[in-house]
Image (cartoon, rainbow, N blue to C red):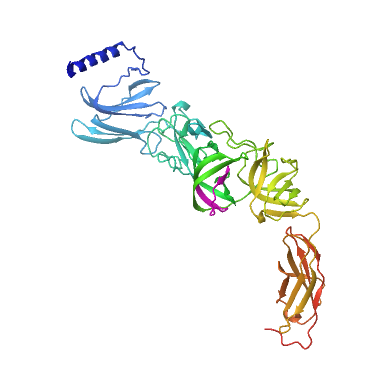
Amino acid sequence: MNSRIVILILTALILRAVADMPARSTPFADIGAPILPVYESACAWGDYNNDDQMDITVAGNGASGPVCRIYRNSNGAFSDSGAVLTGVRLACMAWGDYDNDGDLDLTVTGQTSSGPSARIYRNDTSVRNSPPFAPTGLRAEYTADGLRFSWTAPRDDHTPSPGLSYEIRVGSVPRAGDIVGNAPSPLNGFRRTPARGSLSTTHWTLKEPVAGTYYWSVQAIDPSFQGSQWAEEAVASLSPKTWGDGDFVQIPSAIVTAAYEGFYYIEGEDRAWGLRVEQPDRTARPGRRVQLQGTLATNADHERVLLASSAIASGDADVTAMLVTGRMLGGSDGPSAASGAASQQGVYGGLGLNNIGLLMRLTGRVTRVDSASGILNVDDGSGVIDGGGWTGVRVLAPGMTMPVAGDIVSLTGVSSCYWDGSRVRRLLRVRQEGDIGWITAAGPGPAPASMLLAQRDLYRPWIVGLSWRASASTGTVTYRIYRRLQGATQFSLIGSTTALSYTDTAIPGDKVYSRIEYRVTAVDYRGIAGNPSNISAVNPVDNPPPPPE
């Protein structure tokens, strides 16, 4: 059997199989519109009479030669509008409101019976059309398909909501369209393109979004191609925690808020999320803006982390802590990820939005201090109990000067968490010594400095040197130096130092050789001053040399 016979047999079998297939129904049906048949033609939809129903223009070669007709749509029934237009074949046409009078004008080009033709037909319909109102109810949510934007259809003077179309704008900064452009309509809503919007539904999904902040808006367009004003711009923050463990994520922009040994914290530009980054990056410092990518994970303390594979510095930004109460620190479960699980588990008894990873400030009274482990507890009256049964939020400040129980302090640090074996608990990670500020201090001030001795310089008697023995208190101590000139009733502060000596070179000229008294006061790390030292004086100088110039 040759190949030609084989092909004929196979063809016959296929045709028979197709003939035996059941007939399929189609959603399309000819409505029998009385439209003149044409060839070498073109057509264009447009609501020329502003009744919010799409009319149609047809041009081409008919049975009796070139024609061009406008058919009016009246609730789905089409009829010739009677408009007198020059017939053309090989036609091209477009609707557009060239004179901005609120109705669609028509441009038609092609070949007439006598030669080429190009004409603009002005539409002077008496029915005015107002643009739609702007959409409302803008909402964004992350789903398994991507970042879904939705909105509520607006009102229009003629068009029912299903007849409207839409244009969407999405940007990485306010009033921009760098992710999804707004080329058909600039910020004032004027339509540059006489066409329906690119969307016919009240929702749209951005596929495979990256973590970050999205600024977006939407515009409604009616059948006459008039556009509404852009809706009030909405902000959608897509936290990298939205992704699951093991997922690779990209973060185009974030701000470093704290750096520790082997890891650091970042937060979104709008401070809607924060995240721990596991990467021994010595260049990470608070205030640096970075671009990151890596894999998400959850550590042993149930805190979401980014195992960064790369980090690129991209400028600087301001870093500011948000004031929070002890009960609100940590917060409840974060918004659900696409998998259905919480993007970040909340702390035990947490209230409000999840803020783990964000830079926070907490004020309260110190209830416990464990200097060896660098842990203290601070209670602001919320009655929070930590995993060890201590009242107050647990604060981690290793290697720093610790307050004492009873002090009222203001603390700045990153909202974090720890696992106590059964529950996720609150934790505030202080970044540096300066993050601990004292409002009021409990207990006495430091022990005084002692054995203060004041001496004039033998060769320059207008200079007085001071020395003393250190305060017996532990921790960092600063010494304030006070002076009382002859004739004065009170001591005045003239300087401070952490050393055990000081040189006074700023004695007023008329008091250089008179009696001058000094005393020193020790001040501890809380800013609390102890009792003053003994008073030491230098006596007037007999037969003084000429005063220094």
Give how far across and how far down residue 158 sits, in percent: 46, 28
In the figure, residue 306 lies in which quadrant? Answer: top right
Q: What is the number of callouts on the image? A: 0
Give how far across and how far down residue 117 sits, in percent: 23, 35
Q: Residues in magenta? A: 272-291
Give how far across and how far down residue 263 sits, in percent: 57, 48
Query: Would you say residue 67 is visible in this rendering?
Result: no
Q: As rendered, which of 94 and 139 lies closer to the eye?
A: 139
Asked if residue 197 is positioned above or below residue 528 in the image, the reply reads: above
Say which quadrant the C terminus sits in.
Answer: bottom right
Say which quadrant the N terminus sits in.
Answer: top left
Q: Seen in the image, is 5 located left or right of residue 371?
A: left
The residue positioned 18% from the left and 32% from the top of the image is 114
Q: As rendered, which of 130 and 525 lies closer to the eye?
A: 525
Asked if residue 405 is positioned above or below residue 39 in the image, the reply reads: below
Q: As rendered, which of 372 and 246 lies closer to the eye?
A: 372
Asked if residue 351 is positioned above or below residue 10 in the image, the reply reads: below
Q: Based on the picture, tell me whether residue 320 belongs to the magenta stretch.
A: no
In the figure, residue 353 lies in which quadrant? Answer: top right
Q: Seen in the image, is 127 located left or right of residue 40?
A: right
Q: Seen in the image, is 406 located left or right of residue 39?
A: right
Q: Seen in the image, is 199 located left or right of residue 373?
A: left
Query: Would you say residue 136 is visible in this rendering?
Result: yes
The residue positioned 35% from the left and 24% from the top of the image is 72
Q: Based on the picture, tell me whether residue 273 belongs to the magenta stretch.
A: yes
Give how far across and how far down residue 335 sits, in percent: 58, 35
